[in-house]
Image (cartoon, rainbow, N blue to C red):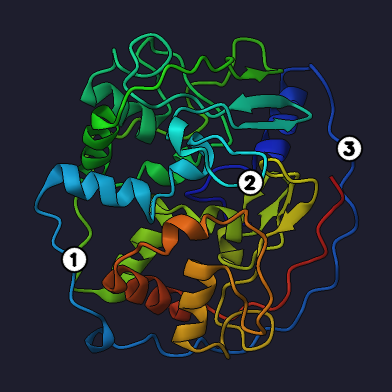
Amino acid sequence: MTTGLGGARPTLIWAALVTIFAVAGCAPEPEPAPATPEPAAAPAPAPAAAAAAIRDSADPLEHGRYLVETVAGCGNCHTPRLADGNPDNSKNLAGAFVIEEPVFKAYARNITPDMETGIGSWTEDQIVDAIRNARKPDGTFMGPPMSFGWYKNMSDTDVRAIAKYVMSVPAVRNEVPASTFTIPGGPPANIYGPIVTSVPDVPKTDIVKYGEYLAGPVGHCMDCHTTYVMGQIDMAQLGRGGNVYARPFIYDWAAVSANITSHPEAGLGSWTDAEIKRAITEGISRDGRTLLPFMPHWLYKKMEPSDLDAVVAYLRSLPPLGPAAAPAPE
C-alpha cells in the first residue's frame, strides 16, 4: 500500500490515532473482497490540441474569486445550507457546516473577514499557512476533514490568490463552535507532513499535468475518489473510489465516491468527454440519473472550458482500475 498526498480519511485516521494515544480502539476490519483483474493498460490521454483557450489569471483577486467559487469549491463546506439543501448566500463562506464522526466533531469555520467570528485579524501569510499547513496563527494545528494533505501542493500563485479573495468578501458575523477531537492536545503537528513554504506554478502547457493539479491540490477531487485502506489513502488505487460519506450536509443518506479511472465498465473509460463534463457541472450521470449533491456541481458549472478540458484529460490518463471492494458499514 502506498500512502500519499491526501493523508488519511477523517474517521479512520482519527480512530487509529486514538488507539495510539490509548484513548480508544478501532473495530476489526472486514475481510477484503477478492481482487478484480485489471486491464493491462490505460487509454492514451486526450491530446493537448483539443483544449480550449487557457484562462488568463493575471489579476490575483479575480483569480482567487474564480478558484474559490469554482474548482476549489470552498463554499461547499464553508457556506451553510438552507433547509432545502441550497447554499445560504446571505452567509457566504461564514461556516458552521458540521461533520460528526465517532472520533471528532468538526465545524467548517467562518472564513469571511469578520474581526470577531471570522478571519479578519489574520494576515495573508497566516491564511496561506492555514490552507497549506493546517497551522493556525496561534501555532496550533487543525485536523480533518479539510484536505490539507492535498493543499500542501497548491502553488504560491493560487494559494495567495485564494487568501486575497477571502480577505475581500463581505464580513459576516457568525459564531462557529470549535471543532473537537478525542486526542489529548488536539491534532499533532506532523499529521500532514513537513511544513511547506513555497510551491511553483504548474505549467498549463501540459494539459494532463495541469488537470492533475486541478483535480488534486486545488479541487481535492482525488481525496474523495481515491480508495482508503485502514485509514490511509492508497495511491495505488488513485481514482478508484468506494469511500462512504455518511449523512453529508443536511441529508439523511450516505454517498459513495465513484470510480473515476479510465476503466471501461467500472470507471469512465467508455464515457464521452461531454458526458464527463455534464456529470461534473450538472450532476447528471451518463444514463441520465441525477447524482447525489455531495459534489458541488453548483460551483463546478462555472468552471472555464479550458479547466474542464484539463480535468477530463487527466481522468483519461488514470490507469483503469476495476470496482473497489464493497465499503465497510459506518
Q: Amino acid at mark 3?
A: Ala
Q: Position of residue 16 (x, y in %)?
A: 73, 32
Location of residue 131 (image quadrant): top left
- Whether tag 2 and tag 1 are in contact, CB under 8 A, the answer is no
- Whether tag 3 and tag 2 are in contact, CB under 8 A, the answer is no
Asked if 228 appears above or below 76 in the picture, the reply is below
Q: Nearer the viewer, residue 181 or 219?
A: 219
Q: Which residue is mark 3?
A: 27
Q: Which residue is mark 1?
A: 55
Q: Which residue is mark 2?
A: 85
Q: Residue at x 43, y 55 (%)?
A: 299
Task: Give how far apart the Cα atoms at labels 2 and 1 are.
Answer: 31 Å
Q: Position of residue 321 (x, y in %)?
A: 63, 77
In the picture, which quadrant includes the N terminus?
bottom right
Q: Amino acid at mark 1?
A: Arg
Q: Nearer the viewer, residue 166 or 151?
A: 166
